[in-house]
Structures are given as structure tokens and as C-alpha cells.
């Protein structure tokens, strides 16, 4: 993905939107962020926060030697595309309801 989300960062993401996410593995915690975001109607904002995190990573990579950071930049850019695709799919699904 070109980025890393630590347990602490996932907890902070949940706290940012006052979401009860519990504890466990990073995968479970991130799943809970989205489950609770759906419950509290803030999934769109969570996607935006994740995009912001990836953007910060990209900015950091831009300050590193290209030889070391190029592959990470490419992966992080793909991650932003995936986030945008997921967000678009979610909005389209909501529009059908």
C-alpha cells in the first residue's frame, strides 16, 4: 500500500470521529472503524482522513532520494486511487438505496 497504519494511528482515527472501535489486531480495528463510521454516518469523512494520511506519506517520500522512495510513492499513489474508487462505489451504492 505504500503506507503503514499503526494500532495507535487507527485508534487516533477512531477517536477523531468519536467512534468506539475496541481493540485487537490492526485489521480488526480498521474494520471496526468503518463499521462504526457506517453506524454513525461518517464513512465519507473516514475515507477523507485516510486519504490525508496517505498524502502525508507521499509528501514525506517526496523529500527522500528518488531511488529509495520511488516504489513507495507508486504504491501510495495506487492506494489513493483505491480509496477514491471505494468511496465512489460507496456513494453510488447509497444513491441506489
Image: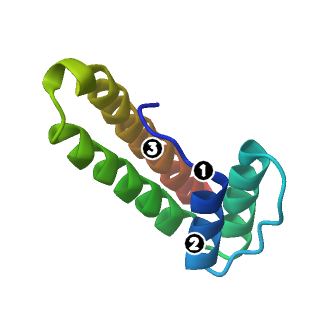
Q: Is residue 15 above or below residue 88?
A: below
Q: Residues within 10 Å of mark 2 (few under 14, many from 20)?
A: some
Cα–Cα gap, marks 2 and 1: 21 Å
Q: Is residue 54 above or below residue 36?
A: above
| Secondary structure found at label 2 | loop
| Secondary structure found at label 1 | loop
Q: Position of residue 57 (x, y in %)?
A: 33, 46
Q: Which is more toward the observer, 85 or 51?
A: 51
Looking at the image, which residue is at 25% across and 22% down?
Answer: 68
Q: Residues within 10 Å of mark 1 (few under 14, many from 20)?
A: few
Q: Which is more toward the observer, 62 or 89?
A: 62
Q: Which residue is mark 1?
A: 6
Q: Which residue is mark 3?
A: 83
Q: Which is more toward the observer, 73 or 92?
A: 73
Relative to 62, is 87 on the left or the right? right
Camera-nearest label, 2 or 1: 1
Cα–Cα gap, marks 1 and 3: 18 Å
- Quarter of the image that includes the C terminus: bottom right
Q: Which residue is mark 2?
A: 42
Amino acid at each position: 500500500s505504500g503506507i503503514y497504519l499503526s494500532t495507535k494511528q487507527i485508534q487516533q482515527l477512531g477517536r477523531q470521529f468519536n467512534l468506539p472501535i475496541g481493540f485487537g489486531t490492526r485489521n480488526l480495528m480498521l474494520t471496526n472503524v468503518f463499521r462504526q463510521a457506517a453506524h454513525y454516518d461518517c464513512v465519507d469523512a473516514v475515507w477523507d482522513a485516510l486519504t490525508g494520511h496517505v498524502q502525508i506519506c507521499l509528501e514525506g517520500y517526496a523529500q527522500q532520494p528518488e531511488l529509495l522512495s520511488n516504489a513507495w510513492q507508486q504504491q501510495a499513489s495506487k492506494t489513493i486511487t483505491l480509496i477514491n474508487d471505494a468511496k465512489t462505489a460507496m456513494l453510488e451504492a447509497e444513491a441506489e438505496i
